[in-house]
Amino acid sequence: MNFLDKLEKRLGFLAVPNVVATLIIAQLFIYGVMLTGRVELEGLLLVPKAVFGGEWWRLASFMIAPPYVPMSLFQGLFLAFFWYILWMMSNTLEEEWGTFRLNVYLITCVVLAVVGAFLGQVISPAGTIFVAPRFLYFCVFFAFATLNPNIQFLIMFIIPMKVKWMAWIILVFGVIAFLAMPTIGHRLAFAAPFLGYVLFFRDTFKKSLESRQRQAQFESNRRQATEGALHTCEQCGASDQSDPERDFRYKSVENDMICICNVCRESAT
């Protein structure tokens, strides 16, 4: 039982179901208020300098601010689509992880975003750092892509693309944006929330790396075993060099002669 399982046993009752849907509804409400002119997006974002100046509400308000303010009908439709995709991906994560784990993941990313913003502002005091809630969309997206890499989305509603390739493309553009930022503080604030993703999937990355290493070792052993061999089993890779005690025979499959050892022949019967 890992740390999260133990934590869920004690604090699982605090988990909020459909938390992303609740967040989207709050953002939609704030967007409606913004249309009346009573609230501006800039007044809601997390700006460490403004917080230091007494605007403490920004520590929470930046999460209920919409990702951006649409200036046209097309941008408005894209924002609606943005919210729909975020809701769909979060629902999938909640089904696969459970409500508590998803809550912890989102809270971790948010806390790291806040800490990263303030540390970045301290490191680079000359610049002005601000944080919008868009980072949470990408944190959810990368988690969704890691768990469901082969699901396809329609780009521009026309071009099918697997979500894992979309994740790689977004990662490349993210690295370019990271390198183009003016100060170390801005870079820290930009990258900090994604540390939550790394923390949650470190075991997955470790297992994937170990699996690739085992596969590479297997292929290396197989190549070494088959070098100079007269007979090599097409199914298990055994050869008269690696397993001289086996009996190798050939059979025709679709006009090709393939070699099968006695162990594989017996297992097939």
Image (tube, helix red, strand yellow):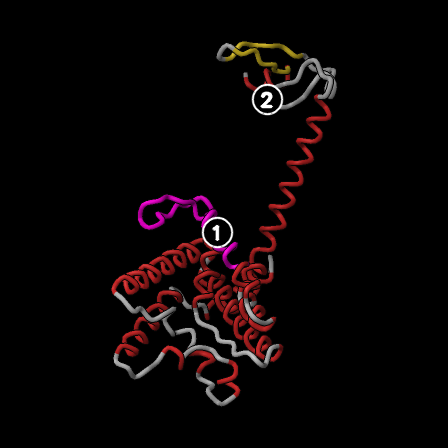
**Up/down of 248 relative to 28, above or below:** above
- Label 1 near label 2: C-beta < 8 Å? no
Residue 178, x across and y down, in percent: 55, 63
**Secondary element at tag 2:** loop
* Residue at image point 51% right, 12% down: 253
Image side of residue 241 versus residue 63, left or right: right
**Disc 1 crowd, CA 10 A, few/some/many (<14, 14-19, 20+):** few
**Secondary element at tag 1:** helix
Is 26 or 48 nearer to us in this picture?
A: 48
- Look at discs 2 and 1 and give the one toward the viewer: 1
Picture disc at residue 235: 2
Q: Tell whether position 128 is magenta.
A: no
Picture disc at residue 169: 1
- Let me know if residue 53 appears in the view: yes
Q: Tell whether position 158 is magenta.
A: yes
What is the span of residues highlighted in magenta in the rendered image?
146-175
Tell me the distance, in whole angstroms, between the alpha carbons under discs 2 and 1: 37 Å
Is 167 or 129 nearer to us in this picture?
A: 129
Label 2 vs 1, first from the N-terminus: 1
- Let me know if residue 9 appears in the view: no
Residue type pointed to by label 1:
Ile
The quadrant holding residue 160 is top left
* Residue at image point 48% right, 51% down: 169
* Residue at image point 71% right, 16% down: 229
